[in-house]
Amino acid sequence: MNSESTSEDEQLKCILIPFLKMSGEQLVCTPDQEFDGSLCELIDRYPSEKNAHYPDIRIRKSYIMSYNNETKNAKWVYEILNNDTLKINCKENGSFGKNEFEGYEQGHLAAAANHRWCQEAYHDTFLMSNMTPQLEKVNNSFMKIVENFCRKKAIDENVRNVHVYTGPLYLKFVRGKYFVLEPEKEEKPGKKIPTHYFKVAFVEDKNGKVNLHSFVVPQIEKEEKDFPEPKVEQFVCDIVKIQKLSGLKFMESRNENTMGKIKSIKWEGEDEKGMPCSVKIKVRIISPHNEE
């Protein structure tokens, strides 16, 4: 994980993704393919947090989110990228309506460029629940750099899927340490302004191996003009730190290797001319039924 080697005697690492939740009843099991014994598995669960309670799960055409009614932003957004889902079947039409964020741009969590395989999926990314106030430099440079990194991984011929989590962070830097703020306690109504964003990408190859890439993107101050020319390496952040700052847990350890089943779904929609279009997704995943 993150290019670090894992010894054979370590516990199995399970990656939590809400794949079955977002796919509904469309699942079809397919025969197992050859598996190389990787120490990573995908398991059907929300990213856990302390005293986890998800009262507002919102399932869109091709992404799923947990919405926080206090901050008016998503806690996390999960999407799947691959060669099929990144097909372009509709034009870029831009945002709907005027920008409601004074001094900020409407920054997407699930990027619009990731969901142009059908018109509805693309339009879903412009819902206000998927957008947060982002500075121009963050929206048009920093976040795009990390998004492009994920898309480039997803179109690799050896990659089956890239599972991506994106969400806001609310932090304060004091004496060399970050502290988590509680923006929901602020009296100012409306969307809270994140100080940072996390993006966690699990790259699942066609042999079942999973590699992790995790990032934190800062919201720099408007007056800061000397930020160096950004590269994706500048935003790399250890997953342990992201889990601590976000309160989320994207992985868990298990004592036994429970072989996941290949699950297939097919999403159907319409292109910009109203013609049918679809994408296919296959994921080797452990469901509650597999664990029994």
Image (cartoon, rainbow, N blue to C red):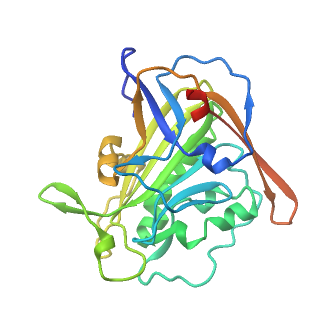
Q: What residue lies at 31% left-to-right and 64% top-to-bottom?
A: 170
Count all numbered tags in the image, as a single digit: 0
Give coordinates of residue 175: x percent, y percent: 11, 58
Q: Is residue 110 visible?
A: yes
Give coordinates of residue 146: x percent, y percent: 47, 52
Q: What residue lies at 49% left-to-right and 20% top-to-bottom?
A: 257
Give coordinates of residue 197: x percent, y percent: 39, 59
168 horizontally vs 38: left or right: left
56 horizontally vs 225: left or right: right
Q: What residue lies at 14% left-to-right and 55% top-to-bottom?
A: 176
State the quadrant of the N terminus: top left
227 and 109: which is toward the camera: 109
Give coordinates of residue 91: x percent, y percent: 74, 66
Q: Is residue 126 above or below residue 109?
A: below
Q: Is residue 207 above or below residue 72?
A: above
State the quadrant of the C terminus: top right
For residue 217, which quarter of the picture?
bottom left
Name the outermost residue toward the top. 9
170 horizontally vs 70: left or right: left
Name the outermost residue toward the left. 175
2 and 32: which is toward the camera: 32
